[in-house]
Image: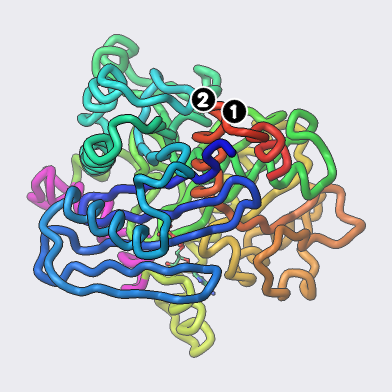
Amino acid sequence: MSPFRVLVLNSGSSSVKYQLLDMRDRSRLAVGLVERIGEQTSRITHTVPATGETREQNGPIADHETALKTVAEELDRDGLGLDSPDLAAIGHRVVHGGMFFTEPTLIDDAVITEIERLVPVAPLHNPANLTGIRTAMALRPDLPQVAVFDTAFHTTMPESAARYAIDARIADRYRVRRYGFHGTSHAYVSRATAALLGKRPEDVNVIVLHLGNGASASAVRGGRCVDTSMGLTPLEGLVMGTRSGDLDPAVIFHLQRVGGMSMDEVDTLLNKTSGLFGLCGDNDMREILRRIDEGDEEARLAFDIYIHRLRKYIGAYYAVLGRVDAVVFTAGVGENAAPVRQAAIAGLEGLGLAVDGDLNAVRSDEPRLVSPASARVAVAVVPTDEEWEIATQTYALIGGEGADEKRKGS
Ligand code: ADP
């Protein structure tokens, strides 16, 4: 039998998330996380979903190489090691692929060089992704390793949506344009929404709202992204857990000139201490909803600002698409926070949008509609699955058995 397992690696600056998937039946053979790499208090948590067993190891893990070796040892204990003949490939999440990478790509030296060239536009993410790639390639140089880019799905955006209205020569020189992120999720969720509607992706227009700690919206026409809310970096767009999203760029000059803040301080402010957290001290939507229930005004205002921005994007993408078949909520907040879905859609009956209170209150891990049967436009909740999407794209690229059917059906 040809190899049927794919290992998905998502390497952050101090963490590695991983999943080992069986491509024959979509089952997860192992799921884990190595966190606080480089500190004394590193930890690996390894779960085998089939048995529910979870193993945890605490103690210093010096670097990504040690982290991946520890992951390999854990997989080995279950007979799922990196040297198993059943392992078909490793799929790596890479945050920034610029305009160059429009598809999942088999990694070789030239690909690594190009990902490296993109470090200036993704200084936090691409170096960590590269470390994961280099380490995995050293461990299994003979195995196909595939890069799946967060930006790839958005490379179909027309220039009118992708360019900023600044001096075109400056923009070109410094590659300043809107790339968009969370693309793997937007791709998966828009396709799964078409399946939920019983239609082909080519035949539906969808507004995808990926609301996690980071958050982004996208307008997808016939399976192709035509606009998305994140830009050069993941800072633009919606109000997020700790990021401001859209603001007048002059706020930055003002904080420097009048507030005496340095460039790095403003960078930290807008990325790390703004958004919901900056507005009310909490970035977890569960906590914010709890505080609102207790009558907390600060949490209420943070929620209202979050919802206002979200509604602006729904309206904007409605206009971009012209005809909309579905608005779909996904990721931690989108999948779980019924009040966010309710408030985002309230009063939009004129656009054919409505939420059914009872359907919206249902908790489920399954894709589902939350709009009344009579609504002109579907409102849906579709749990995202970026690991599965990375695994299927990886498997399809290396010509894995039945990969295309699996991809269409997901
Ligand atoms: P990311 O991948 O961006 O870190 P997730 O998609 O996992 O984020 O989303 C995490 C966020 O989801 C949490 O910060 C929290 O705000 C929100 N969340 C998770 N569960 C719930 C819930 N039951 N109700 C409301 N919000 C939730």
Q: Is residue 115 above or below residue 247?
A: above
Q: Is residue 228 above or below residue 384?
A: above
Name the residue: 25% across, 20% down. Answer: 109
**In x, y percent, where is residue 40?**
9, 69
Q: Is residue 303 left or right of residue 279?
A: right
Query: Mark 2: which amino acid?
Result: Ala
Report helix, strand or loop for mark 2: helix
Residue tagged 2: 161
Residue tagged 1: 226
Classified by dominant secondary structure, the portion drawn in magenta counts as helix
Name the residue: 63% across, 47% down. Answer: 24
User: How many labels sit on residues?
Assistant: 2
Name the residue: 34% across, 20% down. Answer: 166
Q: Is residue 171 above or below residue 132?
A: above
Q: Which span is picked out in magenta?
A: 255-282
Residue 229 visible in the current orientation? no
Q: Is residue 292 magenta?
A: no
- Which image quarter holds the C terminus? top right
Name the residue: 55% across, 42% down. Answer: 4
Rounded to the nearest angstrom, the CA distance separating label 1 from label 2 is 7 Å
